[in-house]
Image (cartoon, rainbow, N blue to C red):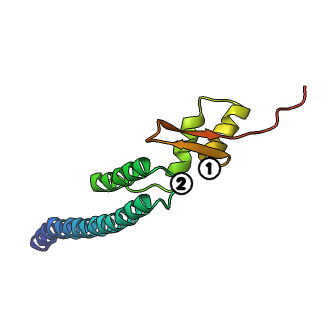
Amino acid sequence: MNNTQGRSRGCYPLLLGALVALSCSTLQAQSRQELEEAQARFKQEMANCVSGNTSQDKDSCMREARSALAEVRRGVPDRPGKLESDTRQRCEVHQGEPRDACEARLRGEGSATGSVEGGGVLREITRPAPAP
């Protein structure tokens, strides 16, 4: 009986090793697929940037596309809602109406004039002031 118990205990490390190897190969395949998908997204985003089919200026658009690809390469997956989270962070320093207007401008409401090449983009939103 002791002999049988000794053999079964010897199989556990082998089984554990096989499971770890399988897990690693699955993760590697997933990360390879994620990288290929990210590279395809990058090419499409760069094409959109160059053609002007975005709401951003060309330089910012291209910088963000490169940053997104770099994050995937570093192993940081895209997070749903990241843009909204970043928008909220930019506007957190304001309170009340100024904060609402900040968030509205970043969502693309209002008007935008100027260019990065020209020194900057001015985003403006006009709202009626409350009656005193």
Q: Residue at x 38, y 65 (%)?
A: 41
- For the residue pair 106 and 121, the one nearer the viewer reads as 121
Q: CA distance from mark 1 to mark 2?
A: 8 Å
83 lies above or below 118: below
The residue where tag 2 is placed is 55
Element at badge 1? loop
77 lies above or below 44: above
77 lies above or below 18: above
Q: As drawn, which residue projects farthest toward the top?
A: 132
Element at badge 2? loop
Q: Residue at x 74, y 39 (%)?
A: 126
Q: Earlier in the sequence, mark 1 or mark 2?
A: 2
- For the residue pair 12 and 95, the one nearer the viewer reads as 95
Q: Quadrant of residue 93?
A: top right
Percent from the top left, x then y, of residue 102? 64, 38
In the rendered view, does 52 fall on the left or right side of 47?
right
Q: Amino acid at mark 1?
A: Gly
- For the residue pair 51 and 125, the one nearer the viewer reads as 51
Q: Quadrant of residue 32?
A: bottom left
Q: Residue at x 68, y 38 (%)?
A: 101
Q: Are marks 1 and 2 in contact (CB under 8 Å)?
A: yes
Count neighbours of disc 2 (C-alpha within 10 A) and say few if under 14, some if 14 to 19, many if 20 or more.
Answer: few
The residue where tag 1 is placed is 108
Percent from the top left, x then y, of residue 39? 31, 64
Quarter of the image for the C terminus: give it: top right
Q: Amino acid at mark 2?
A: Ser
Q: As drawn, which residue projects farthest toward the left?
A: 3
Count neighbours of disc 1 (C-alpha within 10 A) and say few if under 14, some if 14 to 19, many if 20 or more.
Answer: some
Quarter of the image for the N terminus: give it: bottom left
Percent from the top left, x then y, of residue 78? 42, 56
In the rendered view, does 91 fall on the left or right side of 53?
right
In the rendered view, does 31 fall on the left or right side of 104?
left
